[in-house]
Amino acid sequence: MTVPGEPGLGDVDLTDLDRFAAGFPGALFAALRGNAPVYWHAPTAHTPDATGFWVLSTYDTVAAAAADAAVFSSERAPGAAGGGTLIEDLPYGFAAGVLLNMMDDPRHQRIRRLVTPAVSPRALALFESELRARTAAILDAVAARGHCDFLVEVAVELPLQAIAILMGVPEGDRHDLLEWTSATLTYDDRELGTSSARSQEAAAAMAAYGTELVGAKRAAAGTDVLATVARATIEDDGGTSAPLSDAEVLMFFNLLIAAGSETTRNAIALGTAALVEHPEQWALLRSDPGALAGAVEEILRWSSPTLYNRRTATRAVELGGRSIAAGDKVTLWWASANRDGAVFDDPEHFDVTRSPNPHLAFGHRSHFCLGASLARMEIRVMLEGMLERFASITLEGPIERFRTNKHAGVKHMPVALHPH
């Protein structure tokens, strides 16, 4: 498809990862929202598959596409060989159509229902005391030194420990899983649509580990999330019950390790950075613990840990006055929607008292994040722990980021911790 360029935007290349090296390019997306809320991104030298895609940048267009899963598929266009939720096509039957987040209903919802009880508010309420104890241990260890890499020593640890418990993964293995996940999700040594020796080795190690673990779960009588999914049966479209395929269970393992650690750690890190940069907001939270719930939501809006997800149009459709053809790739930029001034007053201001705050950090409708309640609890418990211990936190150097346009990936964040 060829669509004329948009006026007033200049050079737009969202597949040039260097444009995300210093964080989300907010000024560029403000221009997109103002000039072309449904923008045709022609392929560039950086674009995978040499195929253009649509860019949705406003709250209304992103929410509309996310709400219509029948037209905007997470899986593929009918009969297509590839699809998924990344800009680059992933093979159907290997990733697209097998990973839960790259799967359409009704199978998507059937598998989700297997996991929902483990992350329900009732189940998580029983888990909160464990999270508090672990948070205390994490923060006490760094408080004793007064300095730390906040990302590596704090923000990573709580989500990673939590997902290891919920999935029944040996805690001693968690840092291997983190290293493998980071290598497969980030692009420090490669471009979009390509792999490197490091990413290939990490993917192979993750698959070997996951295959062995899933086999052990199927043979035992555990009640953790992975064991539940590994031994479950669900109905197919014909009403016949059968276990999930080996590929589905392995991809489920990969997804939960990544989603359970990657997104929340970045929210905790970037949320803390925002509080460091807005000391009046830190002071407000210290004086009014009742503002914590609002702070969690503002941290999620502000950090927008998942920058975009892709969909594929299953048929021709009109959106925002533009004609999208069947088979077109469509990208939903959550991070841009969360800074849309049509929905959020003064969106570039970090305000823990913001209300209402209908952010889209967890997605929208059928693919709303399964772990939303867990992520909110982890952020809240970590905030409470920090406020109890520290009068203030200061940055001791620049925040170092991963090279990616998919996640708000923080690599290092050196801080000084100042106790009460």
Image (cartoon, rainbow, N blue to C red):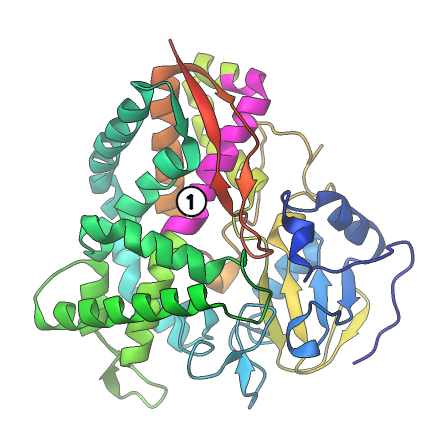
Q: Residues within 10 Å of mark 1 (few under 14, many from 20)?
A: many
Tell whether 94 sits left or right of 221. Answer: right
Rendered residue at 66%/82% (across/down): 327
Rendered residue at 38%/77% (across/down): 107
Q: Along the line of sight, which residue is nearer the eye, 2 or 234? A: 2
Q: Along the line of sight, which residue is nearer the eye, 236 or 45? A: 45
Name the quadrant containing residue 281: top right
Q: Label 1: which residue?
A: 264
Q: Along the line of sight, which residue is nearer the eye, 311 or 366? A: 311
Percent position (x, y) of residue 51? Answer: 70, 77
Does the stretch in magenta take in 269? yes
Give the residue type that dot 1 points to.
Answer: Thr
Does the stretch in magenta take in 191? no
- What secondary structure prevails in the magenta region? helix
Q: Which residues are magenta?
A: 261-282
Q: Is 384 above or below relative to 280?
A: below
Q: Quadrant of the C terminus?
A: top left
